[in-house]
Image: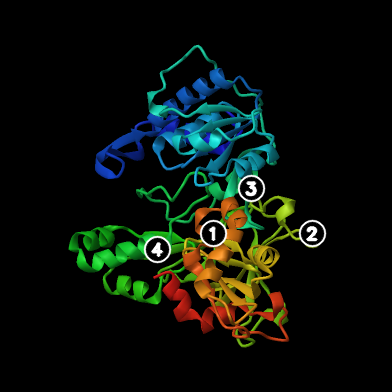
């Protein structure tokens, strides 16, 4: 059978070939957080549950095949996953929106952009749904495992084949650009490409859910760091970490202290480098800070030398990771360079040994926060100048490898109360803070006021008002660290 989503094809094949093999371990909860045990769910059980959910939504929604259906949810439970797969099995295209976005106007703009008129929402979004425009048809989500079987509804396959450019799923980046996350339309070829990538060895591993299903994948480095610190004093946790074939994380690097401690205590670490637009691109070996390009049929990547004006280390030239236009996982043209057609990640690496690379940051105005989300500093700075130009003369947004961005400002006057200035800035920046993710908002606790002329500037590199972001991070490191203490 041919499905619009290759994910369903993989699930169906697994259910046919290995019906009783373990597919998921689902926690048995007491309250919201205490895990009392685990339920085993086989591939066949998963496939049957997906079919049941698909029949329910097909009967409830009665939409034409290929219609976009919004799913506004946290994306953290087995039930959430079943709803996502069920919508695809009903031959609809799920548009996933994390319930962390609570602004109804922002949510409506995303749904309207994809011609999504029907929204299935979780309890976390119930208050926000009330403020959506009336033309949206909204259905509250229910526990997928409690939906009764209804064999009267026939699940059909609308085509004998699907084009590789067919949109299968729509989601948002986990970080913002120009004050808003980007819509990513994942096509059949994206799923085909990523199904060919081998990020872990082909063995029977138990792999935890990597963040919210509403995003490509997330395992926040702070969570791993916190567990490593707990393991210092907790022999049982240490033993558990040592027993894993590997502790796998993505996004930002662990601190050298954490990596050294893990090495000395026989904890195997592995890491990968990825982007929502493309999926996994690089994977580490024994050293989680050293990456190599993933090789897969139909995927084509390369390391391209950056403009010499941006390279500060001529002995070891900086290289940009680029996904070439002929790669199956190359994203929509709107994300690609209009001249060469390639997807430029703007992530910089240094070649340590032939074919082995170490991350060296980004060359544009996008910074990566510690949970690997991206934050558009230029957009925030421009809004600060527009809204607060009478209060500050210069500003720069920093926060690389921090939980959220911080704003460093020079006031227009030396005779100003610092605390009062911070709260004035906070009041005026409400419009910025309402539109993005919670971890990208500028809060009063993350505003640093410095003396006029104190921010590092250069007359050569023309950043915003000649302020150099990287040097600001270095010069005020202790003060910035204190903001997040």
- Give how far apart the Cα atoms at labels 3 and 4 are: 26 Å
Residue located 54% across and 76% down the image:
449
The crowd level at tag 4 (other Cα within 10 Å; few <14, some 14-19, many 20+) is some
Q: Sequence-wise, which precedes: disc 1 or disc 2?
A: 2
For mark 2, what is the residue? 338
Cβ atoms at labels 3 and 4 below 8 Å apart: no
- Give how far apart the Cα atoms at labels 4 and 2 are: 37 Å
Looking at the rendering, which quadrant does residue 440 occupy? bottom right
For mark 1, what is the residue? 440
Percent from the top left, x then y, of residue 309? 72, 82
> Considering depth in this image, is 324 or 338 the residue closer to the camera?
338
Asked if residue 443 can be seen in this view, the reply is yes
Quarter of the image for the C terminus: give it. Answer: bottom left
SS type, badge 3: strand
Q: Sequence-wise, which precedes: disc 1 or disc 4?
A: 4
Percent from the top left, x then y, of residue 81? 46, 37
Q: Sequence-wise, which precedes: disc 3 or disc 1?
A: 3
> Considering depth in this image, is 117 or 262 the residue closer to the camera?
117
- Give how far apart the Cα atoms at labels 2 and 3 are: 18 Å
Compared to residue 484, the image places residue 111 above or below, namely: above
The crowd level at tag 3 (other Cα within 10 Å; few <14, some 14-19, many 20+) is many
For mark 4, what is the residue? 222
> Considering depth in this image, is 250 or 370 the residue closer to the camera?
370
Residue located 53% across and 38% down the image:
128
SS type, badge 1: helix
Left or right: 151 as drawn, with respect to 63: left
- Give how far apart the Cα atoms at labels 3 and 1 are: 19 Å
Left or right: 203 as drawn, with respect to 6: left
Compared to residue 402, the image places residue 175 above or below, namely: above
Cβ atoms at labels 2 and 3 below 8 Å apart: no
For mark 3, what is the residue? 184
- Give how far apart the Cα atoms at labels 1 and 4 are: 16 Å
């Amino acid at each position: 059978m041919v499905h619009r989503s290759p994910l369903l094809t993989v699930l169906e094949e697994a259910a046919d070939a290995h019906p009783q093999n373990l597919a998921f371990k689902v926690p048995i909860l007491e309250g919201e957080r205490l895990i009392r045990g685990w339920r085993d769910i086989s591939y066949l059980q998963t496939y049957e549950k997906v079919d049941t959910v698909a029949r329910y939504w097909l009967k409830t929604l009665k939409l034409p095949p290929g219609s976009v259906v919004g799913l506004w949810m946290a994306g953290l439970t087995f039930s959430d996953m079943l709803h996502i797969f069920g919508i695809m099995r009903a031959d609809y295209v799920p548009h996933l929106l994390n319930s962390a976005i609570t602004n109804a106007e922002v949510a409506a703009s995303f749904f309207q952009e994809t011609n999504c008129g029907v929204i299935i929402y979780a309890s976390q979004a119930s208050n926000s749904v009330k403020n959506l425009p009336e033309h949206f048809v909204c259905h509250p989500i229910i526990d997928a495992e409690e939906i009764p079987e209804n064999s009267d509804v026939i699940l059909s396959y609308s085509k004998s084949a699907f084009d590789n450019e067919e949109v299968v799923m729509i989601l948002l980046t986990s970080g913002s650009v120009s004050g808003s996350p980007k819509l990513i339309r994942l096509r059949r070829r994206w799923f085909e490409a990523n199904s060919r990538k081998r990020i872990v060895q082909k063995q029977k591993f138990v792999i935890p859910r990597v963040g919210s299903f509403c995003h490509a994948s997330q395992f926040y480095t702070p969570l791993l760091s916190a567990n490593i610190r707990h393991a210092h004093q907790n022999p049982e946790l240490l033993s558990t970490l040592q027993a894993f074939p590997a502790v796998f994380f993505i996004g930002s690097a662990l601190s050298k202290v954490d990596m050294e401690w893990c090495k000395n205590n026989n904890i195997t670490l592995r890491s990968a480098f990825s982007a929502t637009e493309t999926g996994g691109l690089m994977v580490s070996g024994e050293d989680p800070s050293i990456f190599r390009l993933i090789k897969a049929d139909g995927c084509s990547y390369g390391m391209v030398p950056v403009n010499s004006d941006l390279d500060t280390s001529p002995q070891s030239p900086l290289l940009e990771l680029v996904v070439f236009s002929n790669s199956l996982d190359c994203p929509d043209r709107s994300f690609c360079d209009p001249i060469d057609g390639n997807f430029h990640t703007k992530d910089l690496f240094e070649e340590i040994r032939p074919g082995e690379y170490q991350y060296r940051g980004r060359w544009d105005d996008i910074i990566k926060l510690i949970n690997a989300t991206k934050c558009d500093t230029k957009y925030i700075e421009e809004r600060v100048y527009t809204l607060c130009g009478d209060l500050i003369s210069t500003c720069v947004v920093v926060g690389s490898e921090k939980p959220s961005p911080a704003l460093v400002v020079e006031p227009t006057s030396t005779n100003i109360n610092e605390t009062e200035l911070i709260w004035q800035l906070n009041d005026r920046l409400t419009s910025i803070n309402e539109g993005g993710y919670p971890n990208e908002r500028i809060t009063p606790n993350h505003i640093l006021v410095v003396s006029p002329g104190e921010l590092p500037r250069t007359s050569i590199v023309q950043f915003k008002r000649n302020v150099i972001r990287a040097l600001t991070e270095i010069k005020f490191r202790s003060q910035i660290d204190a903001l997040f203490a």
